[in-house]
Amino acid sequence: MDPMDYMDGNMLAGELREIFSMDVTAARGRCAGCGRMGMVAETRVYQHAAGLVARCPGCDAVLIRLVRAPDRAYLDLHGMSFLEVPLA
Amino acid sequence: MARATVLRRLTWQAASIADIRVETDTARTIVLDLPGWPGHVAGQHVDIRLTADNGYSAQRSYSVASAPADGRLEVTVQRVPDGEVSGYLVDIAQPGDVVEVRGPVGGYFTWEPEDPSPVLLVAGGSGIVPLMSMIRARSDVHSRVPFRLIYSTRGPADAIYADELRRRVRDDRGVDVAYAYTRTVPEGWPRPPGRLDAALLTASGWPADLGPAAFVCGPTGFVETVANLLVAQGNEPARIKTERFGPTGG
């Protein structure tokens, strides 16, 4: 596997805006694995799994898993212990 | 009684190709007409989806190249080897064709004209596209925020927007551009071909103590290298915004 074979959380913006009313990529979240705080836009996104997997740039733990079916989305966020969402 | 408006979630809308411009041998600018398009913030992107007659579809993210405007936007697309979407947009698409667009999206890699900090833009290849939107937006709002762009390409012929950048350096007061050519350099060029390094970032960027807002966009390896160099030079990591488009490009 190419160690640079990832994109970043910016590319999740469209998928997440279909689900949420605001831009989640500009939110800060905490990794449930290592406690690192970071923007969702800064996560490392891998596309070779079924769906999209966003990993922590600090410890590589899975933060977000998103799988799309034609009529629904499956969103696993258990790797993030919280999100700080700007509302201004 | 008036009914409450039911907000629709963001989804795909049809966009027709109004015009196509050749930028380099491998890059085209696609001008899209989007009725009802609300405009964007410089640095944002859109997702473009193509669907074949048999129902197979493919989508990719592309940065908006134009300055914010209602009803119309431009994306500049670089052809990548075996690229399903870029291959169509660069080689096959014609004015009048219809594609699907979702956006504008992304609230992180954006430049807000209200931020007075000097701006450092660092582009690798087609990573120039969202940074060009920022340069164009700066001009449209008559901002005096000083911008410095460091643009890494293989050689002069691979530089997208080279003519426009030359003109903007001359006419838009406060925009400077430095090139880092990695393979071929023009006759008499002072720097041998090579990757962008700490010396060029120091010479053509901003001192860290000015607190510049940095935007770095390019292939993943390029972005990692430049972001690490900027941190090593004393820049605050939170002031370095990055956008990566994978090992080979979008």
Image: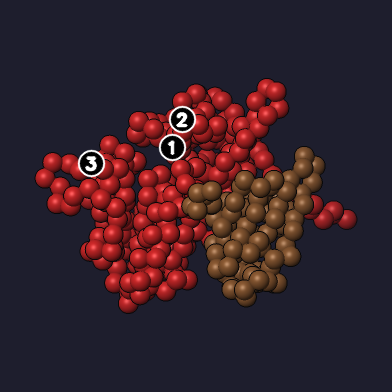
Comes first in the chain, label 1 or label 3: 1
Mark 1, secondary structure of its residue:
strand
The residue most toward the left is B188
Look at the image and tell me whether residue B243 can be seen.
yes
Q: In screen coordinates, is B124 left or right of B64?
A: left
**Residue A54, percent across and down?**
62, 57
Q: Which residue is mark 1?
A: B78
| Residue B164 sits above or below residue B26 on the image | below
| Residue A32 sits above or below residue B109 on the image | below
Q: Residue at x 36, y 67 (%)?
A: B230
Q: Which residue is mark 3?
A: B184
**Residue B151, percent across and down?**
32, 51
Q: Residue at x 65, y 29 (%)?
A: B51
**Label 1 crowd bin: few (<14), some (14–19), many (20+), radius 10 Å:** many
- Give how far apart the Cα atoms at labels 1 and 3 are: 19 Å
The reply to whether label 2 and label 1 mark residues of one chain is yes
Comes first in the chain, label 2 or label 1: 1
- Residue A41 tag number: none
- Specify the subunit that label 3 lies on: B
